Image (cartoon, helix red, strand yellow):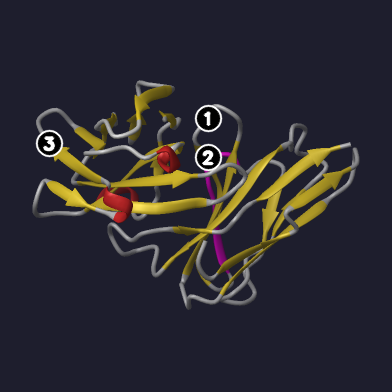
Amino acid sequence: DGGITQSPKYLFRKEGQNVTLSCEQNLNHDAMYWYRQDPGQGLRLIYYSQIVNDFQKGDIAEGYSVSREKKESFPLTVTSAQKNPTAFYLCASSIASGGLGETQYFGPGTRLLVL
Amino acid sequence: AQSVAQPEDQVNVAEGNPLTVKCTYSVSGNPYLFWYVQYPNRGLQFLLKYITGDNLVKGSYGFEAEFNKSQTSFHLKKPSALVSDSALYFCAVSSGNAGNMLTFGGGTRLMVKP
Protein backbone atom coordinates (compact mmCIF):
# COMPACT_ATOMS: atom_id res chain seq x y z
CA ASP A 1 0.00 0.00 0.00
CA GLY A 2 3.08 2.20 0.03
CA GLY A 3 2.86 5.85 0.98
CA ILE A 4 -0.89 6.21 0.63
CA THR A 5 -3.04 6.22 3.74
CA GLN A 6 -6.80 6.11 3.95
CA SER A 7 -8.91 6.68 7.02
CA PRO A 8 -10.98 5.46 8.61
CA LYS A 9 -10.78 1.77 7.77
CA TYR A 10 -14.51 1.39 8.45
CA LEU A 11 -17.12 4.13 8.30
CA PHE A 12 -20.79 4.02 9.15
CA ARG A 13 -23.26 6.44 7.63
CA LYS A 14 -26.72 7.23 8.83
CA GLU A 15 -29.43 8.04 6.33
CA GLY A 16 -29.26 11.66 5.18
CA GLN A 17 -25.75 12.14 6.51
CA ASN A 18 -22.71 13.32 4.58
CA VAL A 19 -19.46 11.53 5.38
CA THR A 20 -15.88 12.28 4.34
CA LEU A 21 -13.20 9.72 3.52
CA SER A 22 -9.61 10.77 3.91
CA CYS A 23 -6.77 10.02 1.47
CA GLU A 24 -3.21 11.23 2.02
CA GLN A 25 -0.05 10.42 0.03
CA ASN A 26 3.59 11.21 0.69
CA LEU A 27 4.85 10.03 -2.70
CA ASN A 28 4.94 13.52 -4.21
CA HIS A 29 2.51 12.34 -6.89
CA ASP A 30 0.63 14.90 -8.92
CA ALA A 31 -2.40 12.78 -9.78
CA MET A 32 -4.89 11.24 -7.38
CA TYR A 33 -7.98 9.10 -7.95
CA TRP A 34 -11.01 7.73 -6.12
CA TYR A 35 -12.55 4.40 -7.05
CA ARG A 36 -15.55 2.48 -5.81
CA GLN A 37 -15.48 -1.32 -5.59
CA ASP A 38 -18.65 -3.38 -5.27
CA PRO A 39 -18.69 -7.17 -4.74
CA GLY A 40 -18.14 -9.09 -7.95
CA GLN A 41 -17.35 -5.95 -9.90
CA GLY A 42 -14.22 -4.20 -10.94
CA LEU A 43 -13.25 -0.74 -9.82
CA ARG A 44 -15.19 2.25 -11.09
CA LEU A 45 -13.72 5.75 -11.19
CA ILE A 46 -15.54 8.38 -9.14
CA TYR A 47 -13.27 11.46 -9.42
CA TYR A 48 -9.70 12.22 -10.33
CA SER A 49 -7.35 15.14 -9.93
CA GLN A 50 -4.34 15.88 -12.06
CA ILE A 51 -3.12 18.88 -10.11
CA VAL A 52 -3.91 20.94 -7.04
CA ASN A 53 -7.16 22.90 -7.19
CA ASP A 54 -8.38 20.91 -10.19
CA PHE A 55 -10.46 17.76 -10.42
CA GLN A 56 -12.64 15.96 -12.94
CA LYS A 57 -15.66 13.67 -12.74
CA GLY A 58 -15.20 10.02 -13.46
CA ASP A 59 -17.79 7.49 -14.53
CA ILE A 60 -19.92 7.52 -11.35
CA ALA A 61 -19.52 10.99 -9.79
CA GLU A 62 -23.19 11.55 -8.87
CA GLY A 63 -23.67 11.79 -5.12
CA TYR A 64 -19.98 12.41 -4.43
CA SER A 65 -17.78 15.48 -4.08
CA VAL A 66 -14.04 16.05 -3.72
CA SER A 67 -11.51 18.78 -3.09
CA ARG A 68 -7.81 19.09 -3.82
CA GLU A 69 -6.44 21.97 -1.79
CA LYS A 70 -3.09 20.29 -1.14
CA LYS A 71 -0.97 18.02 -3.28
CA GLU A 72 -0.89 15.38 -0.57
CA SER A 73 -4.61 15.22 0.16
CA PHE A 74 -7.71 14.27 -1.84
CA PRO A 75 -10.72 13.80 0.46
CA LEU A 76 -13.95 12.29 -0.84
CA THR A 77 -17.35 13.27 0.55
CA VAL A 78 -20.23 10.85 0.13
CA THR A 79 -23.32 13.01 0.20
CA SER A 80 -26.88 12.14 1.14
CA ALA A 81 -27.65 12.19 -2.59
CA GLN A 82 -25.74 8.93 -3.01
CA LYS A 83 -28.54 6.44 -2.41
CA ASN A 84 -26.45 3.29 -2.42
CA PRO A 85 -23.15 4.20 -0.77
CA THR A 86 -22.29 0.82 0.74
CA ALA A 87 -19.01 -0.17 -0.96
CA PHE A 88 -15.25 -0.38 -0.59
CA TYR A 89 -13.60 2.92 -1.53
CA LEU A 90 -10.06 2.99 -2.86
CA CYS A 91 -7.80 5.97 -3.34
CA ALA A 92 -4.86 5.86 -5.73
CA SER A 93 -2.13 8.15 -6.94
CA SER A 94 0.31 8.31 -9.83
CA ILE A 95 3.29 10.48 -10.68
CA ALA A 96 1.38 12.32 -13.38
CA SER A 97 -1.97 11.92 -15.02
CA GLY A 98 -0.79 13.07 -18.42
CA GLY A 99 2.03 10.57 -18.63
CA LEU A 100 1.17 7.47 -20.60
CA GLY A 101 1.29 4.13 -18.86
CA GLU A 102 1.90 5.61 -15.42
CA THR A 103 1.35 3.13 -12.62
CA GLN A 104 -1.36 3.94 -10.13
CA TYR A 105 -0.61 2.98 -6.53
CA PHE A 106 -3.45 2.24 -4.14
CA GLY A 107 -4.22 2.89 -0.52
CA PRO A 108 -5.64 0.24 1.84
CA GLY A 109 -9.25 1.31 1.34
CA THR A 110 -12.22 2.42 3.43
CA ARG A 111 -15.31 0.26 3.81
CA LEU A 112 -18.46 2.35 4.05
CA LEU A 113 -21.55 0.83 5.57
CA VAL A 114 -25.01 2.31 5.95
CA LEU A 115 -26.79 2.02 9.30
CA ALA B 1 -14.12 3.57 -25.34
CA GLN B 2 -11.81 1.06 -23.74
CA SER B 3 -12.80 -2.15 -22.02
CA VAL B 4 -11.32 -5.19 -20.29
CA ALA B 5 -12.76 -8.68 -20.00
CA GLN B 6 -11.70 -11.31 -17.50
CA PRO B 7 -13.74 -14.28 -18.65
CA GLU B 8 -13.26 -16.43 -15.55
CA ASP B 9 -14.76 -15.44 -12.23
CA GLN B 10 -12.62 -18.05 -10.49
CA VAL B 11 -9.58 -20.15 -11.33
CA ASN B 12 -8.71 -23.20 -9.28
CA VAL B 13 -5.24 -24.70 -9.37
CA ALA B 14 -3.24 -27.09 -7.25
CA GLU B 15 -0.14 -25.86 -5.46
CA GLY B 16 2.95 -26.39 -7.59
CA ASN B 17 1.03 -26.39 -10.86
CA PRO B 18 1.25 -23.57 -13.41
CA LEU B 19 -1.50 -20.97 -13.36
CA THR B 20 -3.01 -18.70 -15.97
CA VAL B 21 -5.46 -15.87 -15.41
CA LYS B 22 -6.96 -14.59 -18.63
CA CYS B 23 -7.49 -11.00 -19.77
CA THR B 24 -8.58 -9.52 -23.08
CA TYR B 25 -8.90 -5.85 -23.85
CA SER B 26 -10.26 -3.36 -26.34
CA VAL B 27 -8.80 0.10 -26.91
CA SER B 28 -8.31 2.57 -29.69
CA GLY B 29 -4.67 3.39 -29.87
CA ASN B 30 -1.74 1.71 -28.16
CA PRO B 31 -2.66 -0.21 -25.02
CA TYR B 32 -0.95 0.06 -21.66
CA LEU B 33 -1.81 -3.03 -19.64
CA PHE B 34 -1.61 -3.69 -15.93
CA TRP B 35 -2.14 -6.50 -13.46
CA TYR B 36 -3.00 -5.90 -9.82
CA VAL B 37 -3.63 -8.28 -6.93
CA GLN B 38 -5.99 -7.71 -4.02
CA TYR B 39 -6.00 -9.60 -0.73
CA PRO B 40 -9.15 -9.54 1.43
CA ASN B 41 -10.06 -6.09 2.74
CA ARG B 42 -6.89 -4.60 1.32
CA GLY B 43 -6.02 -2.19 -1.46
CA LEU B 44 -4.69 -3.25 -4.83
CA GLN B 45 -1.03 -4.14 -5.19
CA PHE B 46 0.72 -3.54 -8.50
CA LEU B 47 2.17 -6.72 -10.06
CA LEU B 48 3.37 -5.74 -13.53
CA LYS B 49 2.64 -3.70 -16.61
CA TYR B 50 3.21 -3.68 -20.36
CA ILE B 51 4.07 -0.40 -22.02
CA THR B 52 6.16 -1.34 -25.03
CA GLY B 53 8.98 -3.67 -26.00
CA ASP B 54 9.17 -7.37 -25.10
CA ASN B 55 5.83 -9.10 -25.17
CA LEU B 56 6.73 -11.13 -22.07
CA VAL B 57 6.70 -8.96 -18.97
CA LYS B 58 8.07 -10.15 -15.64
CA GLY B 59 6.74 -8.79 -12.40
CA SER B 60 6.58 -9.28 -8.66
CA TYR B 61 6.35 -12.62 -6.80
CA GLY B 62 7.31 -14.69 -9.87
CA PHE B 63 4.37 -13.57 -11.98
CA GLU B 64 4.67 -12.79 -15.67
CA ALA B 65 2.28 -11.78 -18.42
CA GLU B 66 2.34 -12.13 -22.16
CA PHE B 67 1.08 -9.37 -24.42
CA ASN B 68 -0.50 -10.65 -27.61
CA LYS B 69 -1.51 -7.84 -29.92
CA SER B 70 -3.27 -9.99 -32.52
CA GLN B 71 -5.43 -11.65 -29.88
CA THR B 72 -5.74 -8.46 -27.79
CA SER B 73 -4.82 -10.47 -24.72
CA PHE B 74 -2.61 -10.02 -21.68
CA HIS B 75 -2.79 -13.25 -19.70
CA LEU B 76 -1.14 -13.49 -16.29
CA LYS B 77 0.98 -16.58 -15.64
CA LYS B 78 3.10 -18.22 -13.01
CA PRO B 79 5.06 -21.46 -13.47
CA SER B 80 4.38 -22.85 -10.01
CA ALA B 81 1.47 -21.66 -7.87
CA LEU B 82 1.64 -21.12 -4.12
CA VAL B 83 -1.23 -21.27 -1.65
CA SER B 84 -0.32 -17.69 -0.73
CA ASP B 85 -1.11 -16.63 -4.31
CA SER B 86 -4.80 -17.10 -3.55
CA ALA B 87 -6.34 -13.66 -4.02
CA LEU B 88 -8.39 -11.50 -6.39
CA TYR B 89 -6.60 -10.44 -9.56
CA PHE B 90 -7.50 -7.45 -11.70
CA CYS B 91 -6.43 -6.64 -15.23
CA ALA B 92 -6.59 -2.99 -16.32
CA VAL B 93 -5.95 -1.01 -19.48
CA SER B 94 -5.25 2.58 -20.40
CA SER B 95 -4.37 4.15 -23.73
CA GLY B 96 -3.00 7.33 -25.14
CA ASN B 97 -6.49 8.34 -26.17
CA ALA B 98 -7.69 8.22 -22.57
CA GLY B 99 -4.75 9.80 -20.82
CA ASN B 100 -3.84 7.69 -17.83
CA MET B 101 -7.40 6.64 -17.02
CA LEU B 102 -7.53 2.98 -16.13
CA THR B 103 -10.40 0.70 -17.02
CA PHE B 104 -10.56 -2.43 -14.88
CA GLY B 105 -11.85 -5.89 -15.57
CA GLY B 106 -14.28 -7.50 -13.16
CA GLY B 107 -11.59 -9.50 -11.41
CA THR B 108 -10.71 -13.19 -11.20
CA ARG B 109 -10.50 -15.04 -7.92
CA LEU B 110 -7.54 -17.41 -7.83
CA MET B 111 -7.80 -20.34 -5.46
CA VAL B 112 -4.64 -22.40 -4.96
CA LYS B 113 -5.24 -25.63 -3.06
CA PRO B 114 -2.53 -27.52 -1.17
Q: Amino acid at mark 2?
A: Arg
Q: Amino acid at mark 3?
A: Lys
Tell me the residue at 63%/52% (across/down): A109
What chain is tagged by disc 2?
Answer: A
Q: Residue furthest front?
A: B114
Depth check: give the residue in front, A84 or B41: B41
Q: Is residue A29 magenta?
A: no
* Label 1 – label 3 distance at C-alpha: 26 Å
Instruction: Judge left or right: residue B111 versus residue A58.
Output: left
Mark linked to residue A107: none
For the question of whether residue B2 can be seen, the reply is yes
In the picture of the structure, the residue carrying the numbered disc 2 is A44
Residue A108, image x and y in percent?
Answer: 60, 56
Q: Is disc 3 in contact with disc 2, using a CB cutoff of under 8 Å?
A: no
Residue B29, image x and y in percent?
Answer: 19, 43
Residue B13, image x and y in percent?
Answer: 35, 25
Tell me the residue at 71%/45% (across/down): A111
Q: Quadrant of the N terminus of chain B?
A: top left
Residue B20, image x and y in percent?
Answer: 27, 31
Identify the magenta region. Answer: A54-60
In the picture of the structure, the residue carrying the numbered disc 1 is A41
In the picture of the structure, the residue carrying the numbered disc 3 is B69
Q: Residues within 10 Å of mark 3 (few under 14, many from 20)?
A: few
SS class, disc 2: strand
